[in-house]
Image (tube, rainbow, N blue to C red):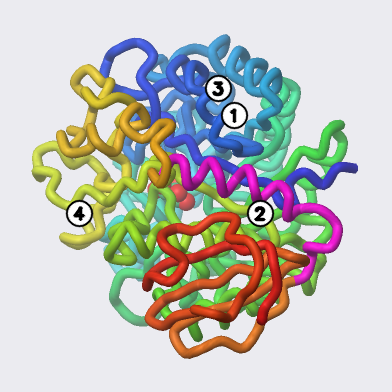
Amino acid sequence: MTDWWRDAVIYQVYVRSFADGNGDGVGDLIGARQRLPYLKDLGVDAIWLTPFYPSPMADFGYDVADYRDVDPLFGALGDAKALIKDAHGLGLRVIVDIVPNHTSSAHPWFREALRGIGRDRYIFRDSRAGGPPNDWESIFGGPAWTQVEDGQWYLHLFDPAQPDLNWEHPEVNAEFDSILRFWLDLGVDGFRVDVAHGMVKPRDLPDIGHPGQVRLIGCEPVPYFDNDGVHDIHRRWRKILDSYPGERIGVAEAWAPTPERLAAYVRPDELHQAFNFHFLFTPWQAPALRRVIDESLATAGSVGAPTTWVLSNHDVKRHVTRYGSLARARAATLLMLALPGSAYLYQGEELGLPEVLDLPEEVCQDPQRLRAPDSGRDGCRVPIPWTRSLGWHRPWLPIPPSWGELSVEAQHGVPGSTLELYRAALRLRRTFQRAGYETLTWHDSPEGTLLFSRGDLVCAVNLTGSTAGLVTGEVLLTSDTPEALDSTTWWRGRVA
Ligand code: BGC
């Protein structure tokens, strides 16, 4: 066992916006494959590819019509195979997204269901008092139920084009076993499990009892999330993963009301990792960060799982914008990469890309933006600028011209650039993964700062205070000058 995943840095490729191999303005697998050397050079251990399966793209691929193929927009199955092979050749592992909570309404099963065949693979119910069967609302806004021609309603926690599957149906279970095996046979190293806390609903589908949107992202208990039955599925999947050589992993995208309930997803016989969104949503304040770091380490540690850390992804505002400055984002990144456990990077954060907040409404496409004016996710999905001239022909979302100076071309080899900071951090990070670096020890430090060590690594974070004079030794890396506010510095040395 190498336990490669326990401290891996995993880079999220949002395929549609990463690299365009065929010049149609949409990123694809050919483009992603061409950029593998860039990712190798960046220093990540694995990539996670967001869904590239045939899909009407009502939710950008999270509405899957065929789980065993590639959408022509993104290439062909052969491109996926070639990408996996090339990645492995470079020593990079490949994780793919699996979307088990719902299919696309274009999936053959749902088409059959509309004709009255096999409806029990989904969640169909009769009307209640002439309206929907219960009071659940969709995460994208509006009722979570849509009525079909013969008067029944089907459940969709997301878009009406994403009908929820009924995981009590043996055929649903068997089908996903087979889908997992299909991709494992092609060599993938694991799965990011979409809405891993949502697959099983209580049979009586109880009302929530109060109006108001319930979001995917949040810890409020709701009857349709975090039901105990989901763990049976994860246990079953773990057995499948373990039946393949090479430590294939499952990563849960899960929300749970308490840290203990979240830890249940990564018990030794369930999935390997769960995203730690509590860290992502912690404000840039020393006490809050220290609390969430301690809580995260303790929670995962209680079941023997590694902690994960993530600051950005395709569903949230990029952390440069959330934190209000690039300096703070860089400091947050160095803090994250100094912590024990596994870290997830979202494409473009290594360039310091901000959220694009001024996309014209006519180009926005995310269904979630219809829920509330500020909730759209298009702004974090703008394509990656590869060159000063941006490197895309008519990208599906416009790239701000100012991003030419943030491009890979503009930052490559430039000391102090965000790209070089990430490269240096990932290179150094490998040296902290050896014996002696397992535990994190906090040291007293002035208000507005954080100070901890792991082995002979000392990490000093200035938020609103200063760590001047607290550490002696050699500065290994700093997100800015060691004494600037909003800076994180890695030292090889000791606390004075
Ligand atoms: C994905 C979202 C998607 C939703 C529905 C989430 O976990 O990250 O992008 O809209 O699942 O599949």
Element type at mark 1: helix
Please give the residue where the numbered disc 1 appears in the rendered image. Answer: 40
Give the residues in magenta: 418-439
Q: Distance between the residues labelled 1 and 2?
A: 17 Å
Q: Give residue 279's mark.
A: none
Element type at mark 3: helix
Toward which corner of the image does residue 390 lie, by quadrant? Answer: top left
- Badge 1 amino acid: Lys
The spot of residue 3 in percent (x, y) is 82, 47
For the C terminus, the quadrant is bottom right
Q: How far apart are marks 4 and 3 (CA)?
A: 38 Å
Foreground label between 2 and 4: 2
Residue at the (39%, 60%) spot, across then down: 329
Please give the residue where the numbered disc 2 appears in the rendered image. Answer: 342
Q: How far apart are marks 2 and 4 (CA)?
A: 34 Å
Please give the residue where the numbered disc 3 appears in the rendered image. Answer: 37
Q: How far apart are marks 1 and 4 (CA)?
A: 38 Å
Please give the residue where the numbered disc 4 appears in the rendered image. Answer: 370
Q: Earlier in the sequence, mark 4 or mark 3?
A: 3
Q: Which of marks 2 and 4 is nearer the N terminus?
A: 2
